[in-house]
Image: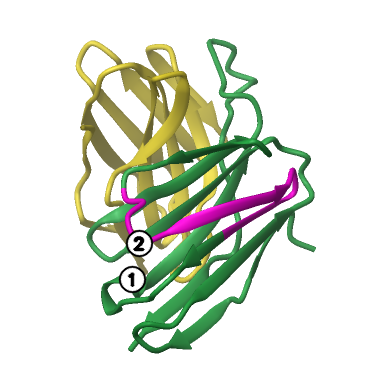
Amino acid sequence: DADVTQTPRNRITKTGKRIMLECSQTKGHDRMYWYRQDPGLGLRLIYYSFDVKDINKGEISDGYSVSRQAQAKFSLSLESAIPNQTALYFCATSDLAGGKAVANTGELFFGEGSRLTVL
Amino acid sequence: GQNIDQPTEMTATEGAIVQINCTYQTSGFNGLFWYQQHAGEAPTFLSYNVLDGLEEKGRFSSFLSRSKGYSYLLLKELQMKDSASYLCAVRVTTTGANNLFFGTGTRLTVIP
């Protein structure tokens, strides 16, 4: 079983609909992230959370909201979906931010991705 | 903002060596990562550099020069399964956070 699980894996919806993407993890990490990936643009950070009571905007948070329901769960919502939100969405987790010790990289662990199409 | 550049596409022959370069201009640099991503799949961690020099891990090595804002990923003895996108990501310390910013990725095609 995957350590970071996203649902749904694929979703087609219409403009104006509300959509929620869910992410759960069994890695025991405090830090969770939502990224979107578009061809030619790479991965861009939408929101991140360092613990249950901490929510922060990333590079491209407009049109999105998030909820950290528990340490293991972080959901992303599109209140009113629009076509330019068509993308591949990834949830990720990490442990400590990392530092000078190579062994403590603070790398991101990604879920399998949720492909969202807004018509 | 962060500026991370890497070539869009590369092609190399099975069994050969390929070097994928990444240059960056950031403030608050706190480490550089390389990830591998097969089409339609999640990125997976390959390597991490925070100090200057070369880190070797089997067929994969990664180099960092902080003064030049430059890194490369070296793949040796290429295999067909190495065909994938390779993402360069820089960790930046700003306002107490340590977040990763990604380049657009280099799509590597390995040919027989």
Q: Position of residue B24 (x, y in %)?
A: 22, 29
| Picture layout, residue A25 above or below residue A118 | above
| Picture layout, residue B34 above or below residue A1 | above
Instruction: Tell me the element at label 1.
Output: helix
Q: Which mark is residue A85?
A: 1
What residue is shown at x 41% (from left), y 59% (from top)?
Answer: A64
**Viewer-proximal residue among B2 and B54:** B2
Q: Position of residue A107 (x, y in %)?
A: 56, 35
First to last magenta residue range:
A60-75
Q: Position of residue A80 (x, y in %)?
A: 39, 74
User: Can residue A68 be seen from the camera position used here?
Assistant: yes
| Picture layout, residue B26 above or below residue B21 | above
Q: Position of residue B87 (x, y in %)?
A: 37, 47
In the image, taking residue A24 as reference, residue A9 lies left or right, namely left
Q: Quadrant of residue A79?
A: bottom left
**Viewer-proximal residue among A67 and A33:** A67
**Viewer-proximal residue among B99 and A59:** A59
Label pair 1/2, CB-CB below 8 angstroms: yes
What residue is shown at x 53% (from left), y 81% (from top)?
Answer: A10
Chain letter, colour green:
A
